[in-house]
Amino acid sequence: MTNDRIVTNEEEPREERKSDRTTGNPLIILAGATGDLGQRIADYLLKSGATVRALVRPGSDPRKLDALRQQGVAVVAVDFSDAAALTQACTGGFCLVSALSGLRDVIVELQTKLLRAAVEAGVPRFIPSDYCIDFTKLAPGSNRNLDLRREFQERLDRAPIAATSILNGMFTDLLNGQAPVVLFGLKRVLYWGDADQPMDFTTIDNTAAFTAAAALDPDTPRFLRIAGEVATVRDLRKAASAATGNEFGLFRMGGLGVLDFMINVTRTLFPQNQEVFPPWQGMQYLRNMLSGQPKLDPLDNDRYPHIRWTSVQEVLKNRSS
């Protein structure tokens, strides 16, 4: 038997019942808590004194649910297609935070269900699962995954709820292998276009810490922009050299037009349209960053002074150590 259940106000555990928006121990509703970012957000919320109620779908990985419970998270299993149950699960929330990952069925449709439930339950604030470059500056069609965030933004901005999107550039952690930019074997930094174009990088952990702080802040604006470090391709070369003790060079593959061609070829030969992060999607994201269009400005790093921002060099050093 499992502890995952929807609780009514009468059945609600004492520690959750007192955790409402009128006390110093607010209740944060968290969707996507079983993912890396979600778990970290939950941890920072708990360390800040919040109560965290994680909404999970029936059939979620029991090991991940046990890990959440051990953190101190109240895990609630709910059918996201059941509007009444989802609304009940959101009752009492100070803010609903989404850290979901997926395609249109998740980013647009499932988040819309969460949005409606939050509004119906009287939750005053909603943080969507954006965590990216400034997609509002990009032309539709330039990035499949960010187009989905734009589509949900239109629904969110029409809803009677205060919304705040956290924009963090690229997760710095991806430079350690998932994003083929810092080529450790070749001791090169791969790029297209201008090596002096500033780009925004923020670690998953810093993003989680900032999101937790924003969730507990009743006066956040529509967008908050952060960057653990603003770095050019030349800066990445210097960071990789310092982190590894080996001199890295630059490897320019051509202009952005060359990258556009490579994206189109890759998407044609290997469409993988049902994958969240096929190779061409990562190429689209890098192309956006190298263009400078989605550069974050102004930055809100100083809004929560307790956060210590992790540099690119620190992340790369952790990989090589």
Image: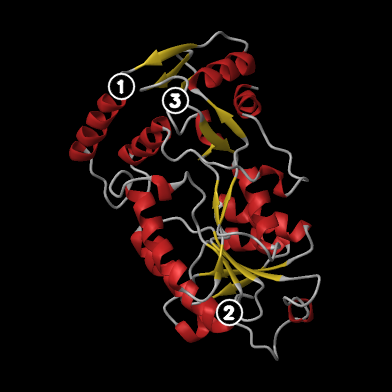
Q: Secondary structure at mark 3?
A: loop
Circle 2 packing at 10 Å, graded few (<14), some (14-19), many (20+), is many
Q: Amino acid at mark 3?
A: Val
Residue furthest toward the top? Answer: 247
Point 80% across, 75% down: residue = 23
Residue 70: % across, % down: 71, 61
Q: Earlier in the sequence, mark 3 or mark 1?
A: 3
Q: Taking 23 as reference, is 59 left or right?
A: left
Question: Would you place residue 45 above or below residue 249 in this image?
Answer: below
Q: Taking 280 as reference, is 243 left or right?
A: right
Residue, disc 1: 255
Residue 89 - label: 2
Point 44% across, 82% down: residue = 82
Q: Are marks 3 and 2 in contact (CB under 8 Å)?
A: no
Circle 3 packing at 10 Å, graded few (<14), some (14-19), many (20+), is some
Q: Quadrant of residue 282?
A: top left
Q: Secondary structure at mark 1?
A: loop
Residue, disc 3: 181
Q: Earlier in the sequence, mark 1 or mark 2?
A: 2
In three-dimensional space, the C-alpha distance between marks 3 and 1, rounded to whole angstroms, equals 15 Å
Quarter placement of the N terminus: bottom right
Q: Quadrant of residue 223?
A: bottom right
Q: Amino acid at mark 2?
A: Ala
Q: Amino acid at mark 1?
A: Gly
Q: Taking 135 as reference, is 308 left or right?
A: right
Asked if residue 248 can be seen in this view, the reply is yes
Q: Nearer the viewer, residue 215 or 175?
A: 215
Camera-side mark, 3 or 1: 1
